[in-house]
Image (cartoon, grey):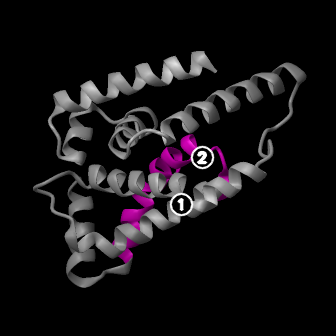
């Protein structure tokens, strides 16, 4: 934790490239996993993860550790990038031309399970993408970022009780819509 604070201060004060690289290395896997769980596309996840870290470096001067932890702040940037992507024309185009790429075929039953799992994830993502932005952020941070309600409340600067209420209402809507389909 102390190393991270030193890295952040070095980047903020001196634009220290070594400290920036250390900071990125420390968080890269968790941010990539967060993005990949939502896109299910390796190349896209790599691109979005890169964009997230570029945004982080461009706005690190505005980071204030009194308002939120660095991890919380970084996940907020990641969530905004994902919401922007899912609202973009690129996402609409990718969805219309997407195939079942990236699905490894081991055995017929494994392949079937992977397809069903992928279809369920895509269906849930499509439903979540239609929600208001605040609900999307809460669901993404909780489901894919595996953050606690306290971390999400801090990140979004909302009361924890409001986060919980919105989360459980959104989960109920997702379940209802998935069952209806």
Relative to 132, residue 54 above or below = below
Give the quarter of the image for residue 137: top left
Residue at 36% x, 38% y is 135
Q: Secondary structure at mark 2?
A: helix
Counting the numbered discs, the total is 2
Q: Secondary structure at mark 1?
A: helix
Q: Is residue 40 magenta?
A: yes
Q: Label 1, on which residue?
A: 48
Residue at 40% x, 51% y is 79
Q: CA distance from mark 2 to mark 1?
A: 10 Å
Residue at 58% x, 63% y is 47
Q: Residues in magenta?
A: 18-43
Q: Position of residue 149 (x, y in %)?
A: 25, 31
- Quadrant housing the C terminus: top right
Relative to 165, residue 53 above or below = below
Q: Label 2, on which residue?
A: 39
Viewer-proximal residue, 84 or 111?
Answer: 84
Q: Crowding near pointer 2: few (<14 within 10 Å), some, many (20+)?
A: many
Relative to 99, residue 66 above or below = below
């Amino acid at each position: 934790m102390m190393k991270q604070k030193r890295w952040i201060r070095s980047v903020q004060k001196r634009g220290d490239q070594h400290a920036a690289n250390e900071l990125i290395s420390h968080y890269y896997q968790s941010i990539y996993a967060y993005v990949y769980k939502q896109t299910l596309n390796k190349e896209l996840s790599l691109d979005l993860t890169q964009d997230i870290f570029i945004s982080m470096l461009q706005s690190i001067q505005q980071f204030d550790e009194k308002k939120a932890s660095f991890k919380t702040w970084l996940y907020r940037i990641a969530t905004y990038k994902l919401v922007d992507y899912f609202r973009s024309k690129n996402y609409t185009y990718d969805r219309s031309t997407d195939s079942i790429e990236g699905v490894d075929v081991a055995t017929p039953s494994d392949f079937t399970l992977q397809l069903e799992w992928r279809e369920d994830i895509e269906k849930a993502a499509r439903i979540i993408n239609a929600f208001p932005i605040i609900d999307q952020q809460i669901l993404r941070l909780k489901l894919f970022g595996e953050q606690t309600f306290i971390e999400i409340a801090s990140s979004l600067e909302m009361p924890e009780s409001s986060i919980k209420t919105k989360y459980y209402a959104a989960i109920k809507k997702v379940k209802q819509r998935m069952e209806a389909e």
